[in-house]
Each structure stands twice: as structure tokens, then as C-alpha cells.
């Protein structure tokens, strides 16, 4: 259903753009004085640019205001379990790898050497959460697992010849 809607919306926009091009081609046959047109469209271009910048600022502020995602509100519910994660070529040092469903977890991720990507994948190899592991900096990623199972932590950033063996597992139980 979603694919059908996306296809129809895309088709409508493609037809709209094609219609604009056809209109421009038809109108281009007429000769007219260029200066009044140039003056008018410079105003339109300026309005369009300012509107676009304002729209993008509003969208950016709206989408970034809740970062980091899934961050629990301390004191209102159970405080998250703090898990320290250190990436190093070619492995992970993780302070805890066993969790319970519904337990809020705060992964504090850093690197001992180069930049790595910290990605948590479920059993279907769907990316559940991710952040960067960078030397001399700690990123936080919050997650509350909703399904029990074995999750894999993989490096998402090519870090050298042993990159492919940078795998760790965590267990989530009921």
C-alpha cells in the first residue's frame, strides 16, 4: 500500500514537472523584452531563497530538538543501565552484554584508536541503533529493547584489515 502511494505521488510530481517544462518550451517561442522579466524574477528568486532557508531552519530545529533519541527522563522512571563501550582494532570492550526487555540502556561509546561505527543489529540483521565511536570523545546512544534475542554489534566504519571480525553479541531476555 505504501509503495503504491509513493508511486502515485512520484508520478504526479513527474507529470507536474513535465508540464512546467512543456509550458516553458511553448512560452519560449514568444519574444519579449528581457529587462522587466529579469527584474521580476530576481525578486521571485530572492523570495524563494529566503523562504527555503527559513523552511529548512524550522525543519532542522524541529527534527533535532529531541536528540539524542530515546533518551529517558531521569527520575521519572527507572534510570538507564550505563554500559561503557570501547572500540579498538579489531574488537569491542563492553562492560555488560546481558539485558532484559524493557530495560532502558545508555551505551557510552568511545574508541581507543581510530574511528569506528557502533551498530546494533537484531536477529534479522536490521539496524536497531547506531553511533560513532571516536577517539577522545564519548557518544551516547539510548535504547530500550522490546524483543528478546541475540543482538550483534558490528563496526560500521572501515577501520582496517580486521574490520570484518569486529563482532560482539549481546543477549536480551524476558
Image: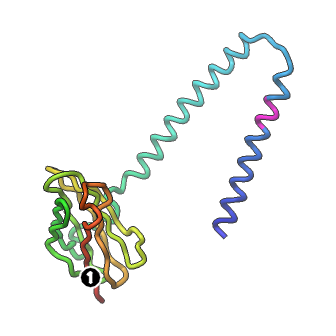
The x and y percentages for residue 155 are 29, 62
The crowd level at tag 1 (other Cα within 10 Å; few <14, some 14-19, many 20+) is some
| Residue range of the region highlighted in magenta in the rendering | 20-24
Residue 51 found in image quarter: top right
| Residue beneath the point at 28% across and 87% down | 173
- Please name whichever residue, 109 or 142, is drawn nearer the observer in this view of the structure: 109
Give yes or no for residue 23 being in the magenta stretch: yes
- Camera-nearest residue between 79 and 128: 128
Does residue 82 sit above or below 40 in this rendering?
below
Horizontally, residue 18 falls left or right of residue 26, namely: left
x and y, in percent, of residue 5 in the image: 68, 63
Query: What residue sits 66% from the left and 60% below the top?
Result: 6
Count of all numbered marks drawn on residues in the image:
1
- For the C terminus, the quadrant is bottom left
Task: Please tell me which residue is depicted at 61% across the width and 25% down the height of the picture.
Answer: 45
Residue 115, how many percent across, how many down? Answer: 23, 52
Viewer-proximal residue among 157 and 46: 157
Residue 174 lies, with reference to residue 62, above or below; the image says below
Residue 60 colored in magenta in the image: no
Q: Which residue is mark 1?
A: 171
Q: Is residue 85 above or below residue 137?
A: below
* 12 with respect to 148 (left or right): right
Q: Quadrant of residue 4?
A: bottom right
In the picture, measured across the screen, residue 134 lies left or right of residue 174, that is left
Q: Residue furthest bottom?
A: 174
Judging depth in this view, the residue of 96 and 100 nearest the camera is 96
Amino acid at each position: 500500500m505504501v509503495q503504491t502511494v509513493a508511486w502515485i505521488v512520484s508520478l504526479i510530481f513527474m507529470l507536474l514537472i513535465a508540464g512546467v517544462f512543456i509550458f516553458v518550451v511553448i512560452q519560449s517561442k514568444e519574444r519579449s523584452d528581457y529587462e522587466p522579466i529579469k527584474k521580476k524574477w530576481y525578486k521571485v528568486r530572492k523570495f524563494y531563497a529566503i523562504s527555503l532557508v527559513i523552511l529548512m531552519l524550522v525543519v532542522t530545529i524541529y527534527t533535532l530538538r529531541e536528540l539524542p533519541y530515546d533518551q529517558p527522563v531521569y527520575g521519572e522512571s527507572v534510570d538507564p543501565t550505563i554500559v561503557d563501550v570501547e572500540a579498538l582494532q579489531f574488537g569491542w570492550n563492553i562492560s555488560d552484554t546481558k539485558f532484559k526487555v524493557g530495560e532502558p540502556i545508555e551505551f557510552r561509546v568511545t574508541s581507543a584508536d581510530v574511528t569506528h561505527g557502533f551498530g546494533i543489529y537484531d536477529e534479522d540483521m536490521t539496524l536497531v541503533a547506531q553511533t560513532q565511536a571516536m577517539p577522545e570523545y564519548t557518544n551516547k546512544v539510548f535504547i530500550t529493547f522490546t524483543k528478546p534475542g541475540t543482538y550483534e554489534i558490528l563496526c560500521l566504519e572501515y577501520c582496517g584489515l580486521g574490520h570484518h571480525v569486529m563482532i560482539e553479541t549481546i543477549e536480551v531476555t524476558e
